[in-house]
Image: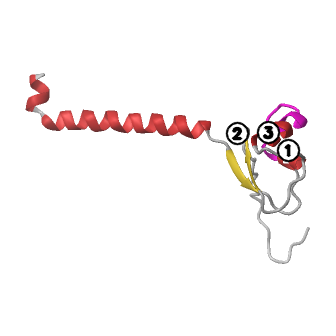
Amino acid sequence: MDILKKNYFLTIFLGLSISFIMTIVIFNTNLEKEDYRITIEHGDSLWTLAEKFGTEEPKESWINQVMTLNNLHSAHIKAGDVLTIPKGKKEQFQFDHKTELAGDSQ
């Protein structure tokens, strides 16, 4: 303990390091438990949302889970609604790395 008393900077460093690690652990734990909140856009349906955000479970099961989470009595949703959806796979984005020259059309 004499080492820590003589080297106060070491004590401060250890304290800050432990605080930093605990903050990261707590933040990541809370982040994993949260569900997504999405705003419904024109043309969205629970079926298309199940294709985007669902897991490997059947789409009907995922839709029932979303309906229960949001207290929906029917599968009808409309643009502008905000729904909570369970955390599953994230929507997968694919980047198009092709180079297109001006005047090229597909």
Label 1 SS: helix
Name the residue nearer the viewer: 95 or 93: 93
The reply, left or right, for residue 54 in relation to residue 24 is right
Q: Are marks 3 and 2 in contact (CB under 8 Å)?
A: no
Residue 31 x %, y %? 57, 40
Q: Earlier in the sequence, mark 2 or mark 1?
A: 1
Q: Earlier in the sequence, mark 1 or mark 3?
A: 1
The structure residue drawn at horizontal position 85% and vertical position 77%, both measured from the top left corner, is 103
Quadrant position of residue 23: top left
Circle 3 residue:
68
The structure residue drawn at horizontal position 19% and vertical position 33%, both measured from the top left corner, is 11
Q: Residues within 10 Å of mark 1 (few under 14, many from 20)?
A: some
Circle 2 residue:
87
Magenta stretch, residue numbers: 51-62
Q: Is residue 60 magenta?
A: yes
* Marks 3/2: CA–CA distance: 14 Å
Circle 1 residue:
51
Q: Residues within 10 Å of mark 2 (few under 14, many from 20)?
A: some
Q: Residues within 10 Å of mark 3 (few under 14, many from 20)?
A: few
The structure residue drawn at horizontal position 73% and vertical position 38%, both measured from the top left corner, is 88
Task: Give the mark toward the camera: 2 or 1.
Answer: 2
Q: Amino acid at mark 2?
A: Lys
Q: Earlier in the sequence, mark 3 or mark 2?
A: 3
Viewport quadrant of the C terminus? bottom right
* Marks 2/1: CA–CA distance: 13 Å
Label 2 SS: loop
- Relative to 6, does residue 97 appear above or below in the rendering? below
Q: Is residue 46 magenta?
A: no
